[in-house]
Amino acid sequence: MSSTQGQFEQLILPIGTTLDRFINTQQNNFPFARGEFSQLLRDIAIASKIVNREINRAGLSNISGSYGAQNNHGEDQQKLDMVANVRFIRALKNGGEVCAIASEEDEDLIDTGNYNAKYVVAIDPLDGSSNIDVNVAVGTIFSIYRRVSAVGSPPGPEDILQKGTQQVAAGYILYGSSTMMVLTSGAGVDGFTYEPSLGEYYLSHPNMRMPKTGKIYSINESSYSAFPKPVKDYIQFCHDEGYSARYIGSFVADFHRNLLKGGIFMYPQSTKAPQGKLRLLYECFPLAFLVEQAGGMATDGDKRILDYQPERLHQRAPLVIGSSEMVKTARKYFLLDHVRV
């Protein structure tokens, strides 16, 4: 083969499998991937493409920066928080497969009016949005459940206040140097990279597995003085072991790096946040489900996160998530009987 022919062969290599085709050809691994479920994933993908476009042109469209209001958590809302929230809610309502939505940006459960729909979605439309102004990676986190109320009736709190073990799918979209959707439906984890010129997600990271251990720890050490002693002791252990501290401030971005390279992310209890800071339904649950499917672990320092029974829509929880051996070691320090603030 001539060098010219070899170069030509490289140019025409297959791009890969699209997200739609992957779902259609993996029916056995996606037990709920009938028409409704496939359409729901398609609706999430469509909304993420629109949000990706908005993020990429935020500086030109004057939609970066603060919105001038606070959400129900007392946090300053960014303009893109509101844009992303509208885009995802609109896509899920119009898609018709979701009867209710729990969003970080809305105080109450959103009734979509689609009473014949079989699914509910919990979503953080734009995690880490304050990083937009400085061009740092941000993301979307989502979780999908089958409704428990009768099809044809209005949804109720019981439809969304389900244990994490009841999730049928979960994932995140990372808007970074490339845009990726990472997805699980309980049969492993697969990553899809967005090809903007073609407008499609393509399978780029099949069967993702998290290393059992690593050398990266992620925690907001500016809160060190507010941490209980066991947490401080574990941080000292990380220092003694020569681990690298990496903390981006976008949960999705920190999680994604650790998923690929091995590591641990921690947002424990503190005097500043006695119940932890991350929200159970649309931050802890989806990434805990995903990390377990990739071979990792997620706890509150002792108890498995997916075993929590939610009591409130915006309930918070401590979180220790990452490579299994690192979480096991951290758990020895973080046992909740000893972590009191």
Image (tube, grey):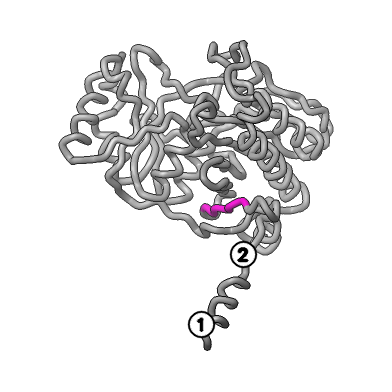
Give left or right: position of 38 versus 316. Answer: right
Secondary structure mostly seen in magenta is: strand
Give above or below for 320 relative to 293.
above
Residue, x 55% and y 50% (percent of image)? 186
- The residue tagged with tag 1: helix, strand or loop? helix
Residue 137: image location, x then y, percent: 50, 36
Give left or right: position of 80 versus 149. Answer: left
Give above or below for 191 relative to 249.
below
Q: Amino acid type of disc 2? A: Gly
The region drawn magenta spans 189-194
Residue assigned mark 1: 3
- Where residue 249 is drawn, which disc sits there? none
Outermost residue, left direction? 240
Q: Is residue 302 visible?
A: no
Residue, x 55% and y 76% (percent of image)? 7
Residue 132: name its quadrant.
top right
Count the numbered circles shown. 2
Q: Earlier in the sequence, mark 1 or mark 2?
A: 1
Residue 75: image location, x then y, percent: 53, 15
Residue 125: image location, x then y, percent: 62, 30
- The residue tagged with tag 2: helix, strand or loop? loop
Residue 167: image location, x then y, percent: 59, 40
Q: Is residue 279 located in the magenta-colored stretch of the structure?
A: no
Mark whose residue sits in front, 1 or 2:
1
Outermost residue, bottom direction? 1
- Where residue 16 is drawn, which disc sits there? 2
Q: Quadrant of the C terminus?
A: top left
How far apart are labels 1 and 2 at the CA level? 24 Å
The front one of 168 and 153 is 168
The front one of 190 and 164 is 190
